[in-house]
Amino acid sequence: MAEFLKELVTSFDIIFYTAGVRRYAELCIQVLKKEMESKYVHEDKNFHRRMDNVFDMNKVISRDDKNRFKEGINSEEKRMEEIEKLR
């Protein structure tokens, strides 16, 4: 799994998405980061710093992120207002 993750993180900017809560995403990221560290930390002294950038919690989208749904909520509110006006 570590080899696959290494290829992924070196080729792409990774965003982590979960339908779960943010705490669940944090635990998943910790597991992935530990997997990478156990395999590659002895090869690269800057590995920890690079992995901190890859497995950054700012790259997580979870169902706790209300801002992500803000546009949908606003458009739904607008639609409801329009329906009310028609009544």
Image (cartoon, rainbow, N blue to C red):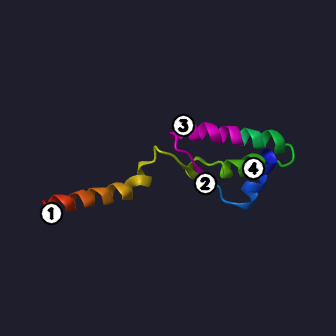
The residue singled out by tag 4 in the image is: 5
Q: Amino acid at mark 3?
A: Arg
Mark 3 vs mark 1, foreground winner is 1
Range covered by the magenta-colored residues: 16-32
Q: Please tell me how crowded label 3 is: few (under 14), some (14-19), or many (20+) other residues with Cα within 10 Å.
A: few
Q: Is residue 11 visible?
A: yes
* Element class at badge 2: loop
- Percent x, y for residue 75? 32, 60
Q: Residue at x 51, y 46 (%)?
A: 62
Q: Amino acid at mark 4?
A: Leu
Q: Earlier in the sequence, mark 1 or mark 2?
A: 2
Whether the residues at callouts 4 and 1 have beta carbons within 8 Å, the answer is no
- Percent x, y for residue 73? 34, 54
Q: Earlier in the sequence, mark 4 or mark 1?
A: 4
Q: Please tell me how crowded label 1 is: few (under 14), some (14-19), or many (20+) other residues with Cα within 10 Å.
A: few
Q: Amino acid at mark 2?
A: Ile
Residue 74: numbered disc? none
Residue 86: numbered disc? 1
Quadrant where the image shows the C terminus: bottom left
